[in-house]
Every structure is written in C-alpha cells, then in structure tokens.
Image (spheres, helix red, strand yellow):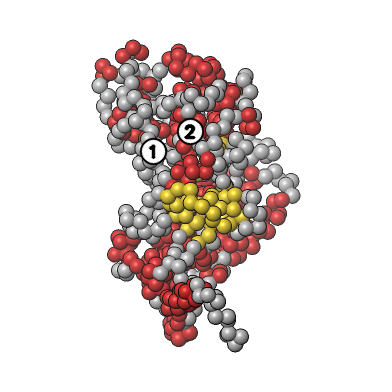
Amino acid sequence: MRYQATAVQYLKRFYLTNSPMTYHPKEIMQTAVYLAMKAEDTFHSVRSFAEKLDVTTESILASEFLLTQGLRFTFDVRHPFHGLEGGFMELLAFTNGKGEAGPGVKKSPKETREEMLDMSPPPGKSKAKDIKEIVIRCQTAHGKAKELLKTSALLTDAYFLYSPSQLWLSTLLIVDEPLARFYLDTKLPLTSEVKPKIFTVLRQCAEMLRSSPATQPDKEEKKELKRIQKKLEQCRNPQKLDLVAINRAQKRDPDMNGGDGLGETVAKRRKLEREQSMKESEDLFGPVLADKKG
Amino acid sequence: MPIADKKLGEGTYAVVYLGHLKADPKRLVAIKKMKVNTAEWRDGLTMDAIREVKYLQELSHPNIIALHAVFSSKNQNLNLVLEYLPLGDLEMLIKDVDGIRYGTAEVKAWMGMLGRAVWFCHENFILHRDIKPNNLFIAADGEVKLADFGLARSFADPYRIMSHQVITRWYRPPELLLGARHYAGTVDVWSMGTVFAELILRRPFLAGQTDVEQLELICQWIGTPVEENWPGVSKLADYIRFDKGNIQPIRGKEFFLSTFGTAGPVGVDLLMSMLALDPRKRSTSRQVLEHKWWTSEPRPTAKEHLPKKGGGPEKMGEDLKRKGGEIPASRGDSVARRLDFSAMR
C-alpha cells in the first residue's frame, strides 16, 4: 500500500512544475510507480515490472531521471498510515483498561475505560452495552478510516496542505466523530486552548477529503476524459513526444548542450568551429577577427 | 553553487571529487557522483543512491554527514554535494597502533558522538544498517560523523519483512545471521557495540571470514543462542541446532572485564548491554545514551583534543566510492583468521 501512495504523491508533485501537455501522465505514471517501489524498499527488477505492464523496460527508465529532477530529488513522502495504526492501537489499549492518557490529562486508565463505555454512539446507532461493542466500533472505524486514507487523501490535495497526523485524525472525524473527540480528550486537557484550533483544521481537512472524486470515473466523467485525451493529442509539445528517443540521444552524447534530442548536430558544429579557430590561432598573425556582422 | 576541483577517488559505484563553493572558494565540499547503468545494474537509479539521498536529505545532525545539495548533470548522473570531512575515518585511527595513542576518555568521546547519531536516526524511524569504523568520518574539528546511508531504510510497517542481508559481516548481529526478517533499531546497537569493542581492542572484535564463522565467533565470545537465553530463537529461519556439548553459556561480566578492562566496570556494563544476544534484551539507542557510563569518570575528551591522523581527502574519496556492506580488501588479512579460545574455557 505504501508505495502506491508514494507513487501518487510523486505524480502530483511532478505536475506541480511540469505540464501534462509536455509529458504525458500515462508515461510518467509507470515510472512513478517504479521509482516509488524502489524508494519504499519494494524493489523489483525493471524487467519483471515492465513485463507485467506489457511495456518496454526503456519506456519506464527513460523518464526516471526526469521524474527525479521534477521531484527535486526529494524521495521521502510522509504518510498518515503509521499514525493511524498507532492511534487505533492506543484506542484498543483504552478498551483493555491499559491505556495511559496524555500528559496534563488527569484520568486513570479505569476512568478512561468508563468514559469510553459512556461515549455517545455514532449517528443511527444505539449506545454500547459492553466493552466488546466498543472494540468492534473501533475496528469498524479503523477500517473505514484506512479506506479513506487510501482513496480520498490521495486523490485530493490534502497531502500538500495537511500534516500526516491531521490527515488521519480528520478521517477519524469523518467516520466516527464521538470517537475522534474521545481520542483527543485523552491527549489534551478539557481546558486546552489549542483544541478548538485543532478541530477547525481537522474540519477543513475533512471537508477537503469529502470533496474527493470517486475512485472510478462515472459515465459523464469518462466522456470528459475522452475529450481531454483527444485534445491533448493535438496540443502536446512535439519535442517531448518520444521520451525514449530523447533519453537515448542524451545517453549517446552526454556532453551535448540541448536537452531536446536535437543538440547533437549543434554540438558537432561548435566542435568544428572550435577546431578551426584553434588552427587559425597558430597562424603568424592570429585568427581572423570576428566579423562585425556576426 | 559548487564547483568540482579534482578527483579524489573512483569506484564501480561512484566517483568522488573535491569541490568548493563558487561564492566562497574557502568552503570545501565533497561531490559524490553516482554512476548509473554500470555493468551489474540495469534498473535505472540504484537503490543505494535513492536511499542515500532520501535519508540524508531528511537528517540534519552534527554527527551525521550533511548533504548540502543534490544536482543532476547532463548525462543523467546524480551528484551529491556532501560535507567535506578531510581527516579520514575511525578505522584509520584504530589501525595506526604505533602512531596514535588514545584512552578511555577518547573512546567515550567517539562513542558518545556515534551514540547520538544512531539515536537521531532511530528517533526519525531510520535504520542505518551499515555502522562500522570506516563509515565514521572525522571532520576537521574532530567531530565524528556517520556516513554512507546506502543500506538505510525506514522502520517497516508492522508484519512487513525486511532483508537480513545487511550490515557488514563483522558488525552484523546474531539475529540477522540467523535469518530474522523482522528486526528493529537494536541491529544498529549491536554494530555500535562491536565498534566500541574494536576501539578498545584496536582490532576488529569479531572478524569472521564467512557467515558461519561469524556466528561461531559470536558463540565463543558472547554465548551460544539457545531457547533459554533467547526465547524464540530456534524459530528463526536459519537457526542451527548447536551441538549440546559445545554450548557456551552467555559470558559473564568477569570475562568481559578481562578483555575490555580498560573501559572500567561501568563501561563494560554498557558494552555488555549493547552486545546482548537477544535483541529484546539489548539496549535501545535511547537506553545507550541514558547509561551512567557517560556521566561517570573519566569525562569524554573535548573534540578539539581528540587525536587526529589526517587521512587526507584521498581517504574520504576512497570511503565514499565504496558500496555498502563491503569489507575493504586490505582489512582482515592482518587479522588472525581464527583465534585460539582453548585457554579461555
């Protein structure tokens, strides 16, 4: 799961500074997944990876460096998943009567357990009869929150705007608000001034997550996608159409100046000019002075 | 903007240059140019390069080599602009038995710097996985800096397996030799312990020529891992049933004091806690820093008074170009292949 999430963020970060009219997302996407697998310690050889996608290895590696540059060499992506797991382990510890409240919160594990039993139920449900029901409630919330982090959090700009802990706490707020409130109450004293501020941010984040597009496009959206694709075909930067060829040219002639695959002849011409000028400089009166016109 | 001046070293995996800043020529940097598409690697950017950039970019600590910038050159090479550390590495100091003398206060200073670096990595959920004396560089002011993050990784998600083929053999903990796929920061603590021992002995402590020999050495010097002293050890993938008559119980404090006496009883206590067989009983990097050895006599030497050898820039080039997990060819030849333990039983 981790590397998929990283790959999505790579793609989003890359297009902060690059246009899809220059580099086609379909090509960058494959490379983003491959690079993310390497960065998240899920290495597979490029051959087996390309085989699965039924593309050439070259098409994956051609844009790897480009993507790396587009990311400004920042491979690390901070995810909310670790925080989510930790938070739910804490919640389950509270149900066992083993959870310790945060500093400044004067509650014994027993009191927190009582409080948990007394928690108001999620909308449309009746109040919990015993602790078992609370455990189930936590597990359900955990599953739902995780699902949101895998979809909405990745498909919106949330990663750019909110920290990992804000992300997972706001998913908890969406799936089970009383539980989220209870959790924060175990961390901060009731009188804490930052609490309202935290909730404001969490609500904004939750709002963004709710606005996420669906994972599968519906009929209308598909139609729109087709139209965009058609338009993209016509207005793509023709110099960057064939990344594989550009990459090959760059590898063949590492010292050339242009990055667009056309630089080879330019470099050759300059080299000739340089040699010519060197030869002439050995003449008695030096080389020909530069023409005023040129 | 850094400018490369001269080549310091070239290996199969990287070329290292000495450079300076264009704005301020007095400020020197080392530029490590990662090679792509070598003969044995056809998968684009190497894992080592990605790891090194990924982790060094996130870590900023006085005892961890600083990554000033990353830039790309035209033929698609990744260039790392690293802090310039001209005085070689700890291994050189350890090896120069005739030229350099040092005592417990110096060892304490170096171990303290290493301990803080490792703790900082762990605090940021990063395992270094290749701690050894020649990855510990010495800055111009004597500060020790942890380098080479080519084998590093973040702590794994729960239940995800990790490779056990990490850490240079002499510094590899028993759980990795036995094939553990789930491990924690304590693998780095074991390496720290072996570095500690090496600093005192002035030769590699457990220098096995093969993985099997390495395990034998651990059995002889620390103790044989069995269910009694390490619950669950026999379930590890590569666990070998040790010969019943040949089991060495875990060595006591007396034994360690006889070998590492110069560290003093409190120092030996710390060493033993770092070299505990069972990773669950081993100190964490935080517990290492909380040990009372640091506050007991003697005080650690101030870094400006630490012995310096001056390995020179070439040594840094030599160290940086190497791939992780390798033992330099010249080492080990000088170490007795097998030590005679018969007298110690």
Q: Is residue B274 visible?
A: no
> What secondary structure is marked by label 1?
loop
Quadrant housing residue A62: bottom left
Q: Is residue B229 left or right of residue B316?
A: left
The disc at residue B328 is 1
Q: Is residue A101 left or right of residue B261?
A: right
At x 74%, y 49%, the residue is: A193
At x 59%, y 53%, the residue is: B20
At x 39%, y 60%, the residue is: B44
The extreme front residue here reads A284
Tag 2 residue: B92
* First reached walking from the N terminus: tag 1 or tag 2: 2
Alpha-carbon neighbours of circle 1 within 10 Å: few (<14), some, or many (≥20)? few
Q: Chain of mark 1?
A: B
Q: Quadrant of the N terminus of chain B?
A: bottom right
Q: For the residue marked with disc 2, what is the amino acid?
A: Met
The disc at residue B236 is none
Q: Which x, y percent locates residue A126?
A: 54, 53
Front residue of this view, candidates B102 and B248: B102
Front residue of this view, candidates B274 and A194: B274
- Vertical relation: B173 (above or below) A35: above
Q: Quadrant of the C terminus of chain B?
A: top left
Q: Which x, y percent locates residue B339?
A: 33, 21
